[in-house]
Image (cartoon, rainbow, N blue to C red):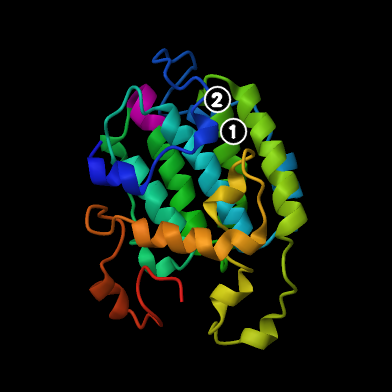
Amino acid sequence: MKEDLALAYSIPDYLLAVGFEDPRLRYKWDDWRASLDFAYDSSDIVARLAGVSMHAKLAVGIGIYEWIVWRFRIVSEDRVPLQIAEAAWCANINRKYMEYVELPRSEWLGIVRGPLWCGITWLVPMVFSGDNDPEECESGLAYLPRLAMHVVPKPELFEAWMNQVIERVIRFHSRPPDDPFEDLFSEHEEERRGPLVAREMLNPRVNYSPETDRRLISNFLRSSDYQGNPFLLSPEQILNSEFIGTPYVLD
């Protein structure tokens, strides 16, 4: 992994003890019927997250995706899945930071690249279209936990983390009232997504409080590697998209 990307975006400390250093892949995988081999029922997760804000739902979705991505770091040197994770966190601050991506299926096959492609393919539409197409958000929140439970080496640890995170977002990030007639021309989409959510919200080892979100998010934005990450737009590109404010600075 390139050193500057490693400094800008690194593994959360709560994932360090999961056992991802084990290179053995014990799960069944067939690229043409992958989800048919998943045994986990994620319907309860989708139902429990129905009442939280869009920013919180996307944060949880990205967090689940991180379990999948980091699970394969010992057997894959491809930086693309990590770069997409970094870009997705920036997009959950403002979608104008990230460039939409669709990866060619033919280049992402097999017991490692296949699950990574699936994770990316369900995460990106969720991040970009979750507001206007609730089914994309629900689909991501339904699919990603099933994929994670199928591929992570200690699924019971993922499930315990998932339950802790859901309890936390329900407590701190309930969905704000949404009257579509107040924003007929979609001029306040970001505000309708609820308050911004820091990545640290997902860390059970952190004594999380929403009051620290803006400071943590500001630090993350400033460290983002938009020069080395092809899925993050440059400040010049962002300003050309009628972005209000200073790119990669939380005003």
Residue placed most toward the observer, 232 or 114: 232
Identify the residue at horizontal 29%, vertical 65% (top origin): 233
**Residue 187: % across, % down:** 53, 85
Left or right: 5 in relation to 211: left
Left or right: 74 in relation to 2: right
Q: Is residue 104 visible?
A: no
Identify the residue at horizontal 27%, vertical 71% (top origin): 235
Check contact, mark 1 vs mark 2: CB within 8 A.
Answer: yes
Instruction: Please give the residue where the numbered disc 2 appears in the rendered image.
Output: 150
Q: Which residues are magenta?
A: 110-115
Left or right: 35 in relation to 100: right
The amino acid at mark 2 is His
Above or below, 234 against 203 in this view is below
Above or below, 120 against 126 in this view is above
Instruction: Please give the residue where the numbered disc 1 appears in the rendered image.
Output: 146
**Residue 200: % across, % down:** 56, 49
Left or right: 70 in relation to 163: left
- For the residue labelled by badge 1, is the local secondary structure a helix, a strand or a loop? helix
Above or below, 172 against 109 in this view is below
The amino acid at mark 1 is Arg
**Residue 191: % across, % down:** 59, 76
Identify the residue at horizontal 43%, vertical 54% (top origin): 88
- For residue 114: magenta? yes
**Residue 98: % across, % down:** 36, 62
The image quarter containing residue 162 is top right
- For the residue labelled by badge 2, is the local secondary structure a helix, a strand or a loop? helix
Report the Cα–Cα distance between label 1 and label 2.
6 Å
Q: Main secondary structure of the magenta part?
A: helix
